[in-house]
Every structure is written in structure tokens, then in C-alpha cells.
Image (tube, rainbow, N blue to C red):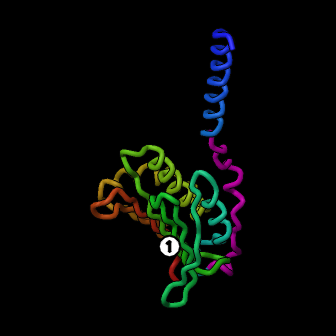
Amino acid sequence: MPKRLRIIVYGVLLVLAVYMYTLSGQRPPPTPAVERQQVTRLDPLRQSASLGVDRADLTAIFERSPFDLRFDFVPLADGRSRVIGRTEDGRTTLELVGPPEGITSANLMAALPEANPLVRLRNLNAVSLLVEVALFDWSGAPDWVSKNIDRAYSGNGVTTQASGKTVTMSRAPQTETLVVTIAGPPL
């Protein structure tokens, strides 16, 4: 094969290889905001101590990209129903306690590593999304998270109540993990 033809063939192959590499690194688009509103709301008579959110809806949201949590049924010692979802990298854990038709609490443990901005961004989005979905009836939820996340991560835990639900954000001691707990109204 002549030298010029070889250079052209290698050039085309190189361009194709770079193109294929670029395509393989693309992620699916983030979950549209419209899908977030498809969470089942329980009627007030069935809510009692519930957050008012169906467990299947929450697991479906967090099983998708970019979170990709894998959930397992792990009942509590007292017999209450519980599922725990974890990311493959172990940097995000979501615990949902209570019956499938209305969880009573949600606990999110999310690592916020300075050295890995993609994990940090994914987990900050998980925090915001969980609070937004679990506190669907509180319009100030996103603002509260934005205003208090740095304070909570600095070591000063923050707590608020909205619609009878209690929300707490704090940093796990000596770690880079933010813990968010949302509990339903007491019985």
C-alpha cells in the first residue's frame, strides 16, 4: 500500500476511533422534571405517620441514572418493612422504612468528596431530589436545602418541620458524608 494511502486510512481510522470513544462516554439525559411529579400521593386517611409517598415511586426514581441505586429488602429486627439502595461505588445509600404504600422515614447517606466532583454533584442532586419528592407539599423545600446544605456539611446539623414531617441534615463525624433524614408525623 502506498504511503499516502496508508496515512489517509490511518487518519480515517483514528477519527472513527475518537468518534466512537466520544459516543461511548455519553450518558443518557437526566431524568426530566416532569417525571418527578409522577409520585403517588396517598389520601390523608392512609397517611397517619407516613411521608405520603409510595415506596415504589421513590425506588423507581433512584434506580435510574444518574443515581443507579440497587435496592434490597432488609426488614428491621422489629418486623417493620425496609429497603436499602446503594450505588455500585458505595458513595450513596438510601434507606426507606415503612410499608410499600407509604414509607414512614427516608434516610440518605451521601458522600460529598472534594476530590471527585462528579460523585459530589450526583449526591447533591440526590439530596435535593429526595427532599423535593418527600416534601412535595412544601414549596420552600428546595430553598431550605440550598440555604442549609453548607451549614449542615460544616458540622452544624440543621432540622426543620414542614407539613408535620421532620427533616434533618448533618455531617457524619470525621467523614465526608452528609446524612439526610426525613421522618413522617408522629402517631
Q: Is residue 177 above or below residue 33?
A: below
What range is drawn magenta here? Answer: 26-47
Q: Is residue 84 above or below residue 174?
A: below
Residue depicted at 63% across the width and 14% down the height: 7
**Residue 69 magenta:** no
Q: Nearer the viewer, residue 144 or 71?
A: 71
Residue type, label 1: Ala
Residue 145 appears at what percent x and percent y? 46, 54
Dot 1 surroundings within 10 Å: few (below 14), some, or many (20 or more)? many
Judge from the rendering whether residue 109 lies leftward or rightward of residue 174; answer left or right.
right
Q: Secondary structure at mark 1?
A: strand
Is residue 43 in view?
yes
Residue depicted at x 62% and y 81%: 99
Is any part of residue 165 visible from this angle?
Answer: no
Q: Position of residue 169 (x, y in %)?
A: 41, 62
Q: Is residue 168 left or right of residue 33?
A: left
**Could you tell me which residue is drawn at 67 percent across and 76 percent down?**
44
Q: What type of secondary structure mainly makes up the magenta span?
A: loop
Q: Is residue 34 one of those drawn in magenta? A: yes
Residue 6 spot, x, y in % from top left: 65, 15
In the rendered image, the residue lying farthest to the front is: 1
Judge left or right: residue 65 versus residue 167.
right
Give the residue pinned by disc 1: 183
Q: Is residue 14 above or below residue 45?
A: above
Compare residues 95 and 149 and report the one nearer the observer.
95
Number of residue marks? 1
Residue shown at the point (52%, 60%) measured from the top left = 87
Residue lying at the far bottom of the rendered structure: 78
